[in-house]
Amino acid sequence: MTTEQETEPTGSGEPSEERQPDWWHRDHPTFASLTGFFTGLAFVVLVPGLFIALLHVLVDDDTAEQLFPFVLVTLAVPIGLVIAPRTRRFGIYMLIGMVATALVVGGVAALVLWYMITHDV
């Protein structure tokens, strides 16, 4: 059944002209969870890289290195999403995605470093 066919009848027996919202517009819990998780993953990967690239374009390298810790201010975004009741589920899963990505990246980096030190690569 297409969305054009999904109209509710009015009192006169005719279908209403108003289009009903699709499933993702009604706060589907799986959709919010998946998009939140992958937004957190992309947030961890993209935001620091874009921030340092922008700093390198605007200022010299020494100043860019000194200003890089200010990227932590962007953590206010998922915290703000968790605080707001309407976006709480999305914010929680965004934080889960951020933490999971950071753990995987840190674990792989530690494993590679251990291997390189152990095997004198």
Image (spheres, rainbow, N blue to C red):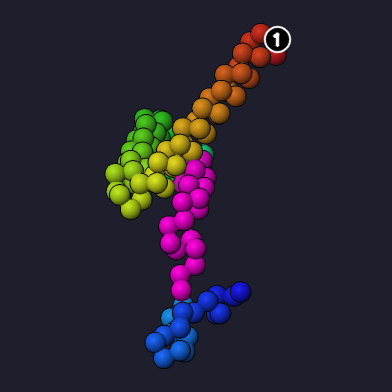
Name the side, left or right, on which 118 lies relative to 107: right
Q: Which residues are magenta?
A: 20-43
Q: Quadrant of the N terminus?
A: bottom right
- The structure residue drawn at horizontal position 69% and vertical position 9%, both measured from the top left corner, is 120
Seen from the viewer's position, the closer of residues 28 and 37 is 28
Q: Amino acid at mark 1?
A: His
Q: How many marks?
A: 1
Residue 49 visible in the displayed image = no
Seen from the viewer's position, the closer of residues 120 and 84 is 84
The answer to which quarter of the image holds residue 17 is bottom left
Tell whether position 39 is magenta.
yes
Seen from the viewer's position, the closer of residues 82 and 17 is 17
- The structure residue drawn at horizontal position 56% and vertical position 28%, both measured from the top left corner, is 104
Where 112 falls versus 73 (above or below)?
above
- The structure residue drawn at horizontal position 47% and vertical position 56%, both measured from the top left corner, is 28
Residue matched to label 1: 119
Q: Position of residue 102 (x, y in %)?
A: 50, 30
Q: Quadrant of the C terminus?
A: top right
- The structure residue drawn at horizontal position 49% and vertical position 79%, both measured from the top left corner, is 7
Q: What type of secondary structure mainly makes up the magenta span?
A: helix
Tell whether position 47 is magenta.
no
The answer to which quarter of the image holds residue 93 is top left
Q: Position of residue 14 (x, y in %)?
A: 47, 89
Q: Secondary structure at mark 1?
A: loop
